[in-house]
Amino acid sequence: MSKRRDFIKNTLLGSAGLLALNHLEAASRKKRKPVVISTWNFGLKANEEAWKVLGSSGSALDAIEKGVRLIESDPSERSVGLGGRPDRDGVVTLDACIMDHKGNIGSVAALEKIENPISVARAVMEKTPHVMIVGAGAQQFALQQGFELKNLLTPESEAEWREWLKTSKYKPVINIENHDTIGMVGLDSLGNLGGACTTSGLAWKMHGRVGDSPIIGAGLYVDNEAGAATATGHGEEVIRVVGSFRVVQNMKHGMSPKKACAEAVKEIKKLFVRRGADWSNTQIGFLAINTRGETGAFALRKGFNYAEHDSTGNVLKDAEFLL
């Protein structure tokens, strides 16, 4: 009988301890200070827009969608959304994905004539049983959801495309043409993570080409028990290593955000070597945030920067690099 009492006592104590730990974790999450990070210098503007939501105790997902939409709708930003550089046929095609703290995901790829693909991706996540819709089907879905058709090829981008047609040579330029994505991840005041990634892809790409940006696990990944990560640069190489998922898994195994990003970059370089491929004209960058709000980034080579916004302000930082 005494053994039975001891067993019940120990079980209750164990349960109480577990409940206490859960309460402590919940309390800790509620005390988190919000922070948002995004790729490249246009991330400063995106962060300011996101902070209007995040700084007022809004959700990470709402803040991030609002932040990247600003860049999608800015025709002066020539690698995202309206005004994005076209493919070799002169067509602007857009890719985007979004992911919340519960593991809900939505994605669109090869989307034409819709200014804000990130919001279409969110509609896919919230209003369909699917996670990715592409091409004409994505446009059809967007129209059904009330989005409007719009000519995304601005005079400036069209002029660049016509100039390119004179030689039709495709050679990506490090940190210029590869400056092709806004990825944003953040942590809200409830301790929940969210992320988004949106792009018009590499300029002068083959029609129908899709990079890493709309692919969950490659261009973006969110795990509320570990962290969130996003990528920019040469999408084919990011896909090859399932880059953002790899970064988040690295954080889950105890690495800091910067270390987690660095290890993913090293894996990409390793595959370049194994394949005997030329990486002299390629750039890849990752940025990440963990559940404690710690951030970090790392790139293949010099030139990748990212913006970080918390309660102390909004700053642009240069990422460390491998080569």
Image (cartoon, rainbow, N blue to C red):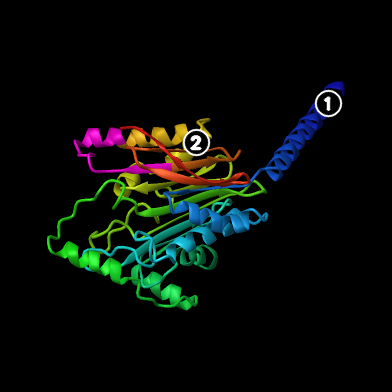
The location of residue 192, given as percent across then percent down, is 62, 48
Q: Looking at this view, name the residue that lies furthest to the left.
A: 167
Q: Is residue 152 left or right of residue 125?
A: left
Residue 91 visible from this viewpoint = no
In reply to whether residue 293 is colored magenta, the answer given is no
Q: Is residue 156 left or right of residue 243?
A: left
- Residue 128 or 237: which is nearer the viewer? 237
Amino acid identity at mark 1: Arg
Q: Earlier in the sequence, mark 1 or mark 2?
A: 1
Magenta segment boundaries in residue numbering: 269-286
Q: Residue at x 13, y 64 (%)?
A: 166
Residue 270 within the magenta-colored segment of the rendering: yes
Res. 257 mark: 2
Displayed quadrant of residue 299: top left
Residue depicted at x 76% and y 37%: 19
Badge 2 amino acid: Pro
Q: Nearer the viewer, mark 1 or mark 2?
A: 2
